[in-house]
Amino acid sequence: MKKLNSIFTVAQKTVLGLAITTLIFSVSCTSDIEPLAGIDDASVEADLIAQADFEEIDDIASNMMSIADGGTGGRVTDHNDERCGCAEVTHDQENQTITIDFGDGCEGPNGVFRSGKIIIKYNGRRFVPGSYWVITFEEFYVNRRHIEGVRTVTNISESLAADPKFHITLEGGKVTWPDETFATREVDRVRVWIRSSNPLLDEYHILARSVAEGTTRKEVNYSCLVLEDLIYKRTCRGARKGRIPVAGVKEVVFGDRKFTIDFGDGECDNIVTITSADGTRTINLSDR
């Protein structure tokens, strides 16, 4: 069982989550494990890419909300996200809007090429209960993938003193590849940021009953349901090549195939247990 952390780095988080699922369902996952019948590897990978794209955007927006917290207006050059280093960032304080404009395109860290705009409209400061922000796009592309949809993040924390809790939805999510194939995605989840006096001990949790669903690039329906809170620990980052939960259980359905994925008991390892109608397998992702 595992949990996610929130605002650590979107690119790594999303790519990590994608990589794990891709590895789990890949027909070439590992030499000593039988392929999971009926699962199209390319479709799963495409879904994971779509998931990663939206998670990274969420992370960028969360970081950029610090601009609203600071209350400065106009063009912003002093922000805390290097992925937006080549973009023009502006803050319309009166209309509570932050625009991240990558123009005709520019290359950020890790060779990621972005173009178009991410637009964030907000109400209130991000850590204040009841505040929210809505993320939309204007001709926005990531490595030539066209991103569409409306992502809404609402602070549902009980108080300023409580660990920040956010309700996150994605409506009309769609990622279109240059060949015009596409994957769709809808999300309804609750995420809690467990903060520590030492930030290195922070955790990020995706709570049970959080869901995601959509269609893959091959038009296969899928869904994902968190059965037990997914837990991500920041302290585990150095022990892994990617970001995967350290505990938690989720159920994944592709077409008529159902799988349960157990991420463990909280240790910083790369071991996951997958159960399906074919039986149970334990996979070590350390070298993948």
Image (tube, rainbow, N blue to C red):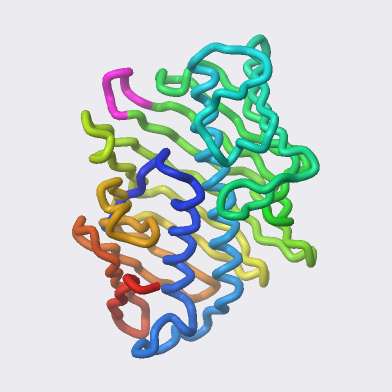
**Within the image, what quadrant is residue 111 found in?**
bottom right
Is residue 225 toward the left or the right of residue 45 in the image? left
Q: Residue at x 49, y 17 (%)?
A: 69
- Specify the quadrant of the image occupied by residue 76: top right
- Considering depth in this image, is 101 or 48 the residue closer to the camera? 101
Q: Quadrant of the C terminus?
A: bottom left
Q: Residue at x 54, y 54 (%)?
A: 52
Residue 245 within the segment the image draws in magenta:
no
**Image location of residue 226, percent across then percent down:** 37, 54
Q: Which residue range is magenta in the image?
A: 157-163
The quadrant the N terminus occupies is bottom left
In the image, residue 273 lies at what x, y percent?
Answer: 29, 72
Q: In this rendering, is residue 7 above or below 34? A: above
Residue 159: say if magenta. Answer: yes
Q: Nearer the viewer, residue 164 or 111?
A: 111
Q: Is residue 260 left or right of residue 257?
A: left
Above-or-below relation of 184 to 128: below
Residue 219 on image: x %, y %: 67, 69
Residue 253: horizontal and vertical position, in percent? 47, 68
Who's the residue at 61% across and 24% down the image?
77
Q: Main secondary structure of the magenta part?
A: loop
Q: Considering only vertical position in the picture, is 286 above or below 249? A: below
**Residue occupying the point 62% across, 34% down:** 135
Count of numbered badges drawn on the protein? 0
